[in-house]
Amino acid sequence: MWNILGQLLHLSITDIIDIVLVAWIIYEFYMLIRGTIAFTVFLGIILIVVIYQVVNIFQLPMFSAFLGQFISAGIIMLIIVFQNEIKRFLSIIGTPLRKTRIFNQNERKRFLFFKLPNYDVSEKASEIIEAALHLSHEGFGALIAIEKNTVLQDIISTGIIINAEVNRKLIETIFYKNTPLHDGGMIIRKNTIVAARTIFPLAEETNFNDLYPSLGTRHRAAIGLSEQSDAVIIVVSEQNGAISIAYQGVLYYNLNTIEFQNKLLSFI
C-alpha cells in the first residue's frame, strides 16, 4: 500500500492526463446507462473491480487469482450485456454536439450524487385514472408505465415517440382497438406521454404461469418491467376490464376504483 502512495506522489503530467481521460470515459458511460436496467450490472462490475484491488493490496494470492480469472472471462460477457449501451456511447463520442446525448440536460434526475428536483406526475394522475376507468368500461386493453427514478430510455427507443402532455382523451385514443399505436406499452415521464407502442421486458415465463395462469402478455409485460425498474405500470384487461397495477415485481390485480386510485397515488 505504501508503494501505491509513493507512486501517487510521483505522478507525471502524462500520468495525470491518462487518469483524467479514463475517468472521463467511465463518467460518460455512467451518464449513458444511469437509471437504466444495465446500471445495476455496471455497479456490480465496479464492486468486483474494487474488491479485486483490495485483495491485491492485502496480498491474498488465491482469492486474487480467482477474481482475475473471473474478470478475464467476463470481458466477452460485458460486450454482450452492454452491446446497446456501447453503440450509443460510441455514437456520443463521435458526435460533438451535446444535444445528441441520450439524456437532455434538463431531464437529468441526478448530477453525480446530487438529486435534482423532478416534476410531480401526480398532477396528471386524475387524467390517467379517468382514462384507465373509461378504457375498462369500454372493454379496451391498456398498458401504461409511469416512470420514476429508473430512466426507461431503452424501452422508449423500441416505440413511437409522442412527447405530448398527459391527457385523458389522448390516452384513450391511443389504446382504442385497431388504432396504429394500441399494441404495446405507453411511457409517461413527468407530465408527458413520451412514447407509445413500446416493448416491455417480459416476466420469466415459468414463474409467471405458476403465479398467474389465467393472465396474458400485457400482465406478464407489466410484471417484467416492474421487476427491472421502479416504474408504476397500469394494466387494463381487454378480456374482463380488470384494472391492475404492477409495482416492484408485485401485481395488484383487479382493483376497484377506490383501490386503484389509492394505490396509484401512493406508488407514484
Image (cartoon, rainbow, N blue to C red):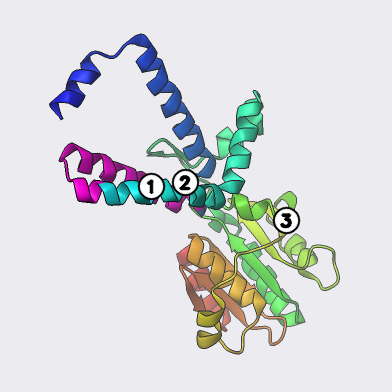
What kind of secondary structure does the magenta stretch mostly adopt? helix
Disc 3: which residue: 159
3 or 2: mark nearer the eye: 2
Looking at the rendering, the stretch of residues picked out in magenta corresponds to 38-64
x and y percentages locating residue 98 in the rendered image:
62, 27
Mark 3–mark 1 Cα distance, whole angstroms, equals 35 Å
Instruction: Kindly identify the residue that appears in the image at 47 percent across and 39 percent down.
Output: 30
Disc 2: which residue: 75
Horizontal arrangement in the rendering, residue 184 relative to residue 15 (left or right): right
x and y percentages locating residue 150 in the rendered image:
50, 53
Which of the numbered marks, if any, corresponds to residue 265? none
Instruction: Kindly identify the residue that appears in the image at 59 percent across and 70 percent down.
Output: 202
3 or 1: tag closer to the N-terminus: 1
Disc 1: which residue: 71
x and y percentages locating residue 155 in the rendered image:
63, 55
Q: Residues within 10 Å of mark 2 (few under 14, many from 20)?
A: few
- Mark 1 and mark 2 in contact (Cβ < 8 Å)? yes
